[in-house]
């Protein structure tokens, strides 16, 4: 066992993506260093940090809990240290997502006031639906008037200090959840207030009570949900609500004779404009000797432009540096989050330009173009022009594009999903899913989310767990880099349905295919439904809410779990925490720094379930993880059926417990 673990840790080629593997093999010994090499150099990693018992909150530290020292210098025991570190991780995620949401909100404020010429209201229907959800009057008002009020309410959700609770949270989840949050004193007024109070609470010499700290972490995580939901809703208003479209994914989408622009990061405000500018500037590229310009995506901005524009995903988080090593990426345009600083040194070994664009996400030596919404197209053209110029410096002897790509059908916003279901049951679309679960055709649903993390082989856990669950008739939906894995590895198309779906799942997807023949323009539905970027985990949660409404139950009764098989970022910690708080069992495939306190660990794994219905499961082995997820779903389906049968037999209300 120890030998196996050691061998796993020493293997540089830690990936099951054939394109990534090819690049790693071809460049072995070339001197170009990537995360795969740095991971090996980093071994062994600090076990105190790993288990969460290292505190650096004040500069008496670092204090770490050992056999000799059961408390930090100030007297903080392991449970205080672990819980404080946990909140701070959640706050990192909440801040990242909500800053993204705020950026989108401010841009839409400019649209409402008529101050920007390059953006508009692409989806007025979504705006109306959103306003209605938020109980904003739409009757007799112009789109811009409605938008102004939506934006003002969003801004209040960022900054309100007391009085009213977060509108986005209150209006997006079912009332039973809100009652629970008020009862537990974790219902937030606003994002910024909660971040400030949580940072204060975790200052040296403040809160030492682990339960109080963990509850505050959950309140902070609910603010993450708010910030993400605002980002998703307003991006739909600004750029359109996604609907299914076809594309291709993996390194084989690079074109040897074209200007290749990789769009990397998270915020579609920039990437949408670059895609538009590239379409207009094809002629300029031809004059430079290329056959044209092709945009492709990495990480979540890639998911955003895939969902709305059909832009091909190039790769996901862990292999971002490897994309440059194909020698065929002319510019990698980055905005915010999950951009490894390492891309710059890799780019310096090739002709690639790294173009940074956002004031709070710069990389030394990169080419910086200050993106500005008031001059969005002008800036996007400037970016594309740099890519065209860089193409001229490409060294053909260094070009090596792995011939790996797979067909992708993506774009399943909740609205798109509902439309597919409506073709089967126009009056009660979600009954198509609840019936399939009650009749045993489907076992339930699992959301695959989250990152890559070199502590487990790249993409392996994502792939193994999803395939295993699809065989067992779980309806899989995916977001973020999990969806990136499935796109690259060929699970987002109908061939994968034939190959991997269990009989029930196959019958379910075929029924949707049959009913939607015309809407799908000759395409067929995929095995896994790509619901978008990481902020779009809110779409996946809204699907859970829709099922809860259909069954008239609270969300913890719905057989729907989440899995982050290769979780890495603070954002993954905050998303996992709100999923638990909102009632989901959540599997995490890389153990986060929590087990250093058995008490905090117990809250995450067990007590959370008693209070909120959701809970965490840590499991690194993907086969084991699949079995645990399946058991969690089956337990819920079984209980739901028992409670329903009892309610019918005794003519009572459905039991509210889970
Ligand atoms: O927000 S899944 S590695 S890219 S954090 Fe980052 Fe993780 Fe990818 Fe998207 Ni989400
Ligand atoms: Fe050590 Fe306490 Fe300071 Fe943390 S807050 S570093 S445990 S003295």
Image (cartoon, rainbow, N blue to C red):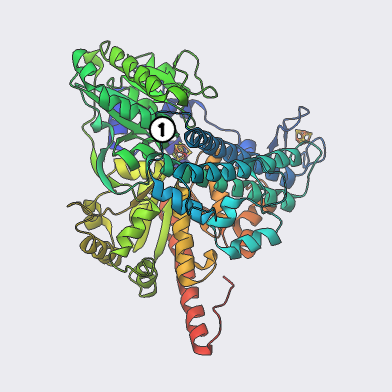
* Element carrying mark 1: loop
Give left or right: position of 114 versus 285.
Answer: right
Residue bearing mark 1:
119
| Residue in the image at 35% along x and 51% along y | 412
Q: Is mark 1 within 8 Å of ligand 1?
A: no
**Residue 320 picture quarter:** top left
| Vertical comparison of 507 with 623: above or below | below
Residue at 28% in and 64% down: 423
Q: Nearer the viewer, residue 631 or 130?
A: 130
Q: Residue at x 29, y 25 (%)?
A: 278
Name the side, left or right, on which 306 lies relative to 630.
left
Relative placement, left or right, of 83 versus 370 is: right
Q: Is residue 526 visible?
A: yes
| Image coordinates for residue 10, horizontal then vertical, percent | 43, 32
**Where is 218 relative to 369, above or below?**
below
114 relative to 78, above or below: above
Where is residue 246 drawn, in percent x and y? 24, 44
């Amino acid at each position: 066992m120890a030998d196996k673990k050691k061998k796993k840790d020493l293997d540089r080629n830690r990936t099951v993506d054939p394109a990534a593997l090819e690049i790693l093999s071809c460049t072995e010994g070339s001197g170009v260093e990537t995360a795969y090499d740095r991971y090996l150099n980093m071994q062994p990693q600090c076990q105190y940090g790993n288990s969460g018992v290292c505190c650096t909150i004040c500069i008496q530290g670092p204090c770490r809990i050992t056999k000799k020292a059961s408390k930090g210098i100030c007297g903080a025991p392991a449970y205080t240290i672990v819980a404080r570190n946990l909140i701070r991780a959640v706050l990192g995620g909440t801040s990242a997502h909500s800053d993204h949401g705020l950026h989108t909100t401010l841009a839409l404020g400019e649209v409402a006031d008529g101050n920007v010429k390059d953006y508009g209201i692409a989806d007025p229907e979504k705006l109306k639906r959103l306003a209605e959800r938020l109980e904003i009057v739409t009757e007799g008002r112009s789109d811009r008037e409605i938008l102004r009020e939506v934006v003002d309410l969003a801004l209040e959700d960022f900054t309100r200090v007391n009085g009213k609770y977060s509108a986005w949270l209150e209006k997006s989840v079912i009332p039973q959840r809100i009652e629970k949050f008020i009862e537990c004193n974790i219902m937030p007024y606003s994002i910024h207030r909660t971040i400030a109070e949580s940072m204060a609470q975790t200052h040296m010499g403040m809160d030492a009570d682990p339960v109080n700290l963990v509850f505050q972490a959950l309140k902070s995580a609910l603010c993450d949900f708010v910030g993400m939901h605002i980002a998703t809703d307003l991006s739909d208003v600004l750029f359109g609500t996604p609907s299914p479209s076809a594309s291709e994914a993996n390194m084989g989408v690079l074109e040897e004779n074209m200007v290749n622009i990789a769009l990397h990061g998270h915020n579609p405000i920039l990437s949408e404009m670059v895609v538009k500018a590239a379409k207009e500037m094809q002629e300029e590229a031809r004059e430079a000797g290329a056959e044209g310009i092709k945009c492709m995506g990495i990480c979540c901005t890639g998911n955003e432009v895939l969902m709305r524009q059909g832009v091909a995903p190039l790769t996901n988080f862990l292999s971002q540096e490897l994309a440059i090593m194909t020698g065929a990426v002319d510019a990698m345009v980055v905005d915010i989050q999950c951009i490894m600083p390492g891309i710059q040194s890799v780019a310096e070994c090739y002709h690639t330009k790294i173009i940074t664009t956002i004031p709070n996400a710069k990389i030394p030596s990169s080419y910086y173009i200050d993106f500005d919404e008031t001059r969005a197209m002008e800036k996007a053209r400037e970016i594309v022009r740099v890519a065209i110029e860089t193409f001229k410096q490409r060294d053909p002897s260094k070009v090596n594009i792995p011939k790996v790509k797979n067909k992708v059908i993506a774009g399943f916003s909740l609205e798109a999903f509902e439309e597919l279901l409506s073709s089967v049951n126009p009056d009660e679309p979600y009954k198509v899913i609840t019936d399939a679960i009650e009749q045993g055709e489907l076992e339930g649903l699992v959301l695959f989310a989250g990152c890559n993390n070199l502590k487990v082989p790249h993409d392996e856990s994502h792939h193994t767990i999803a395939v295993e669950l699809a065989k067992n008739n779980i309806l899989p939906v995916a977001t973020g880099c999990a969806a990136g894995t499935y796109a690259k590895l060929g699970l987002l198309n109908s061939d994968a349905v034939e190959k991997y779906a269990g009989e029930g799942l196959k019958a379910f997807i075929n029924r949707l295919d049959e009913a939607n023949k015309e809407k799908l323009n000759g395409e067929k539905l995929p095995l896994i439904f790509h619901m978008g970027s990481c902020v779009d985990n809110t779409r996946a949660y809204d699907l859970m809410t829709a099922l809860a409404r259909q069954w008239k139950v609270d969300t913890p009764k719905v057989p729907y779990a989440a899995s982050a098989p290769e979780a890495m970022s603070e954002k993954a910690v905050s998303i996992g925490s709100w999923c638990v708080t909102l009632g989901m069992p959540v599997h995490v495939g890389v153990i986060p720094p929590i087990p250093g306190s058995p008490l905090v660990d117990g809250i995450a794994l067990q007590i959370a379930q008693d209070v909120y219905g959701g809970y965490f499961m840590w499991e690194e082995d993907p086969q084991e993880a699949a079995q645990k997820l399946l058991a969690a779903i089956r337990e819920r389906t079984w209980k739901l059926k028992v409670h329903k049968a009892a309610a019918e037999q005794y003519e009572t209300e459905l039991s509210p417990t889970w």
